[in-house]
Image: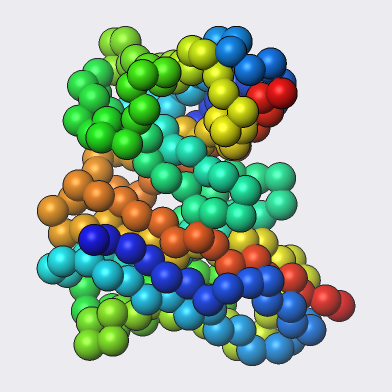
Amino acid sequence: EAGVVQSPRYKIIEKKQPVAFWCNPISGHNTLYWYLQNLGQGPELLIRYENEEAVDDSQLPKDRFSAERLKGVDSTLKIQPAELGDSAVYLCASSLGIEDTQYFGPGTRLTVL
Amino acid sequence: GNSVTQMEGPVTLSEEAFLTINCTYTATGYPSLFWYVQYPGEGLQLLLKATKADDKGSNKGFEATYRKETTSFHLEKGSVQVSDSAVYFCAFLDNYGQNFVFGPGTRLSVLP
């Protein structure tokens, strides 16, 4: 069975440019998470979806970050415009439900110059 | 607020040494507790979990016991291998099932 797929794996952009990350969760998983992981730190939740509904986006900086999960399957996380401090690894995870095991994708490493 | 504290790394051990990585948490109620591992170049994966007090999670020779009285979930392994070199994250899910919180991670290096 395929795991959580993320693309791209690496992205280098200049500040003020837009960037988008894509996630394809494990088939049948209703819950999808986007995390931000800074170097040497644990993942921090940005947003959680139950199907197509964002049920927890309290940590998402809404002035520049946006996310969507159309049809309750794939999800896209966007940053516009990117800032130097956005350089990090962006992780996507999915699970059957909130209390079930989360499966993580390999992440997208973003570098903002 | 909710938080997880882990022992600082990096932890460097020789092969076959005993491993302990301490983890304590601050949360309301009775959270579920997890250890995730991130091998070099790979995504996080669940190592083990425990959902109620005194439960012991185990996998791949690793163990951790849910200690409610000390709010701890220390990770142990009796004999580490080079292939155990990775970053280990302690985490919990609060008992409302709403907040999933990770610790900062502890890097383990096992030398042959």
Residue occupying image coordinates x 41% and y 33%: A34
Residue occupying image coordinates x 37% and y 35%: A46
Residue A7 location, x and y as percent? 60, 21
Say which of B88 and B52 sits in front: B88
> Would residue B9 appear left or right of A22 to someone viewing this image?
right
> Would residue A69 appear left or right of B106 to someone viewing this image?
left
Name which quarter of the figure residue A11 lies in: top right
> Would residue A86 appear left or right of B11 to someone viewing this image?
left
Say which of B75 and A87 sits in front: A87
> Would residue B80 appear left or right of A67 to someone viewing this image?
right
Residue occupying image coordinates x 32% and y 36%: A59
- Which quarter shows the C terminus of chain B? bottom right
Outermost right residue: B112
Position above or below: B75 against A72:
below
Name which quarter of the figure residue B61 lies in: bottom right
Residue A53 location, x and y as percent? 21, 21
- Which quarter shows the N terminus of chain B? bottom left
- One can see residue B39 in this view: yes
Position above or below: A76 against B12:
above
